[in-house]
Amino acid sequence: MKRLVLIVTSLLLVSVALAEPATSVSAGGTVIKTAYNPTLKKTIVVDGRGRTVYLLISDAGGIPSCAAISPDCPKAWPAVAAQGKPVAGKGINASLLGVAKGAGGVKQVTYKKHPLYFFHGGFGAPAGDKKPGHVRGQAFYGIWYVLSPKGNAIK
């Protein structure tokens, strides 16, 4: 019986750890919003959980180019996946949101035609963002930047 309780508890903990918080995906789709970042002392674009999102300056016309840089790029810089139609949260202009086909066929959220990415780090890159508010990928190699609420790179 103790073994069964241990197994059930372990499975429950794993399922909770893998679950997305309700604020990151609404009934309509992936939430994109703004938040003030104390490190940059600016309001930036984040996902519904408050995680910083980035643009890659080599992306043109809304087409993601991360995978073309290196096969490890999508591992270090995973796409902000679109769960349904993206939803404009606080401070976001809904007309600037869109979806593009990213690496591996992932539906990737775009803002002002910039495909959005998270920074996980590794694969030759330094430690990535571990919690909301981190901006460790800002200005990385001079090609990765956080976005302003207007959808422009913050340099």
Image (tube, grey):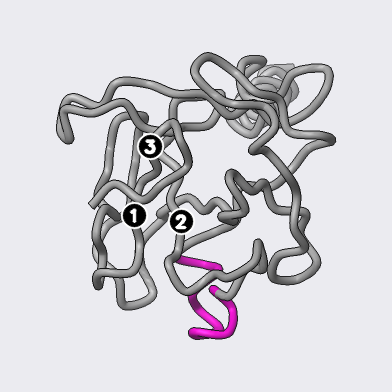
User: Measured along the vertical axis of the image, is residue 11 above or below residue 117?
Assistant: above
Residue 111 visible in the displayed image: yes
Can you identify the residue that label 1 sits on?
145
Q: Which residues are magenta?
A: 66-76
Q: Does the residue at mark 1 contact the one at mark 2 (Cβ under 8 Å)?
A: yes
Q: Position of residue 57 (x, y in %)?
A: 42, 67
Q: For the residue marked with disc 1, what is the amino acid?
A: Tyr
Name the quarter where the N terminus is drawn.
Answer: top right
Q: For the residue marked with disc 2, what is the amino acid?
A: Leu
Q: How many marks?
A: 3
User: Is disc 1 placed on a helix, strand or loop?
Assistant: strand
Residue 14 falls inside the magenta stretch: no
User: Is disc 3 placed on a helix, strand or loop?
Assistant: loop
Residue 6 visible in the displayed image: no
If you read the primary sequence from the N terminus, does the residue marked by circle 1 or circle 2 appear first?
2
Q: For the residue marked with disc 3, what is the amino acid?
A: Ser
Question: Which of the 4 image quadrants contains residue 65?
Answer: bottom right
Q: Position of residue 91 (x, y in %)?
A: 49, 18
Between disc 1 and disc 3, the foreground one is 3
Nearer-the-camera pick, 19 or 64: 64
Instruction: State how far apart marks 1 and 2 are (Cα).
Output: 5 Å
For residue 148, which numbered disc appears in the image?
Answer: 3
Q: Residues within 10 Å of mark 1 (few under 14, many from 20)?
A: many
Residue at coordinates 59% horizontally, 18% vertically from top-left? Answer: 89
Q: Position of residue 16 (x, y in %)?
A: 63, 23
For residue 55, which numbered disc appears in the image?
Answer: 2
Residue at coordinates 50% horizontally, 85% vertically from top-left? Answer: 70
Question: Which of the 4 image quadrants contains residue 101?
Answer: bottom right
Residue at coordinates 29% horizontally, 55% vertically from top-left? Answer: 137
Q: Does the residue at mark 2 contact the one at mark 3 (Cβ under 8 Å)?
A: no
Residue at coordinates 17% horizontally, 35% vertically from top-left? Answer: 40
